[in-house]
Image (cartoon, rainbow, N blue to C red):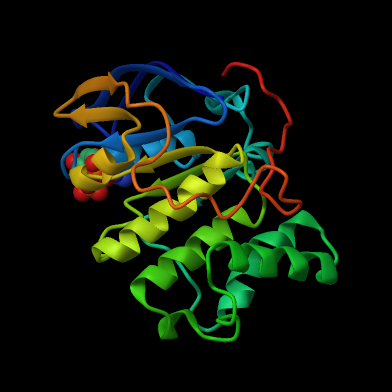
Amino acid sequence: MIEFQHVFKSFGRGRNILADVNFGIAPGEFVFVSGPSGAGKSTLLKLVGGLEPASRGAVTVNGHRIDRLSARTLPYLRRTVGLILQDAHLLFDRNAFDNVMLPLAVLGLDRATAATRARAAMEKVGLRGKEDLSPIELSGGEQQRLAIARAIVGRPAILIADEPTANLDHDSAVHIMDVFRDFNQVGVTTLIASHDTALMARYARRTLRIDAGRFEDIAGVPGRVEGDRGGSMSASDANAPGRLDGSRGTP
Ligand SMILES: Nc1ncnc2c1ncn2[C@@H]1O[C@H](COP(=O)(O)OP(=O)(O)OP(=O)(O)O)[C@@H](O)[C@H]1O
């Protein structure tokens, strides 16, 4: 589903941030990207999301070589990837509901269908009742959940989040991670950058670690999350975020 083959990335004439990085992520995996500040976590996520090109090597997402997509076709691939970047880019002059509706505008859905989907997305991240508030009236954790709702409303096959729990207290951080866990449990491939080692240990998943140009692929402990409260969604959930391509093949 996501594959890096001999990927190098530098900016301008700078050092290699990523140097000969190789890994594959299968559909439905939940993977952390870790490493100290400035190591290249955001850069790796941006390569997957098609926001930055690799300097060398092949990045394949959903069966497509990102570097071979034209400016016209790249947006189609991007729609299969829900991105939650460090700066959430929420629109403060619109209410929370309209922020979630925004990505649906390009999908050509009628207003009623779009509104139903947006309400379902807000419900899944626990923001029901907050539809009419401006994002500025939401707490940091709620803003982060709004960003997640906006990322999942288009039903992406892949969810990518850059430090989604930064600046949140422990309980809010766990709540956010549980939201990701729930989406992952209904089949969404999930890639999360974090340097919160305690949080990553709690979730004990496969971790791609970048540190001073060195890349390590560390297997996590498979199985259920410690303290799992049980998912609030199930695969049979009619509104569950589905895979767009329906494929189950290897990356
Ligand atoms: N557009 C850019 N132009 C030039 N250099 C960049 C660009 N984006 C990132 N870098 C550099 O690449 C390196 C890796 O940055 P990146 O944001 O990927 O690190 P990170 O691991 O996500 O850090 P943090 O945990 O602080 O967010 C840094 O030295 C950064 O200055």
Front residue of this view, candidates 136 and 176:
176
- Find ligand 1 in the image and state its quadrant: top left
* Quadrant in the rendering for residue 197: top left
Q: Position of residue 120 (x, y in %)?
A: 68, 64
Residue 162 higher or lower than 148, as above or below: above
Looking at the rendering, in which quadrant would you find the N terminus?
top right
Q: Position of residue 190 (x, y in %)?
A: 48, 39
* Quadrant in the rendering for residue 136: bottom left
At 61% from the left and 41% from the top, the residue drawn is: 186
Front residue of this view, candidates 206 and 222:
222
* Image position of 137 (left or right of 172): right
At 47% from the left and 79% from the top, the residue drawn is: 135
Is residue 52 shown to the viewer in this render? no
Q: Position of residue 131 (x, y in %)?
A: 60, 80
Residue 172 higher or lower than 53, as above or below: below
Q: Position of residue 145 (x, y in %)?
A: 47, 64
